[in-house]
Image: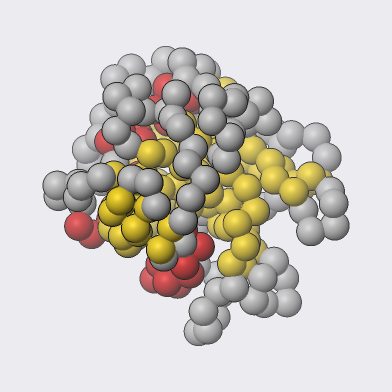
Amino acid sequence: MAVIHHTTLQPTKVDLLTDWLPTRPWFRGGSGAPVLERSGGFRLDDPEGEVGIEFIVATDTAGSERTAYLAPLTYRGAPLEGAEHALVGTMEHGVLGRRWAYDGFHDPVLVTELLALIEGRAQAMAQSVSDTPDHEVTRSCAAPLGEARFTPEPADDEHGTRLPVAPEAVLHVHRVLTPVAGNPPLPPRDALGHVATGWPGPDGTRLRAVVMTLRTA
């Protein structure tokens, strides 16, 4: 199980995302910098204990309407070879030292553990508490996906990220989230699988959204 260290980060994760989000084709803000708040998310455990895996829900409050984004990040103690284009930034961790933060869909450790989550072989963990499952994260999968296929690379466009995960399956990552209040949202009827989660809304309600949908390629 991953150990959550309550310590300092310079720059913070929100600082990194503030600079990185506007460079993405799916970013919905204007020309100004986003004003982000860390609304929620969850973690996955790396069985080897080397890579931190976190799915952050960050909400941009700069415009007239709040916009929630999904930012999956991995944290490493050394650069990931061949992933320079996916580097979000580096941070100085008060306990672990320098950490390299990557857009997680370019990291094979995240992809492997995410597919295990979708298939029900891995447990989503609380974002900020050690050794605590996050039972609000829901998932489904109509059929086993088999061993993760990590080639080709994920592709970003204005709608989000498409990640081929099997010969006939593509994971659609909803980078811009559509939250609803109340019961957990359901995936589209034709979906092969999904992942959904929730976070606190600004008015005290609980917001929930499907964050990834598995579809036929």
**Number of numbered discs overlaid on the protein picture:** 0
* Residue 207 drawn above or below residue 115: below
The residue located at (72%, 71%) in the rendering is: 65
Report x, y in % for residue 195: 56, 33
* Residue 85 drawn above or below residue 22: above
| Quarter-of-image position of residue 3 | top left
139 sits left or right of 149 in the view: right
Q: Nearer the viewer, residue 42 or 140?
A: 42
Q: Nearer the viewer, residue 151 or 96?
A: 96
Report x, y in % for residue 9: 43, 58
Report x, y in % for residue 72: 45, 47
The residue located at (74%, 34%) in the rendering is: 184
| Quarter-of-image position of residue 145 | top left
* Residue 2 drawn above or below residue 40: above
Report x, y in % for residue 78: 20, 47
Quadrant placement of the N terminus: top left
39 sits left or right of 7 in the view: right
* Residue 12 drawn above or below residue 137: below
| Quarter-of-image position of residue 134 | top right
Residue 119 visible in the picture: no
Q: Nearer the viewer, residue 162 or 179?
A: 179
187 sits left or right of 142 in the view: right
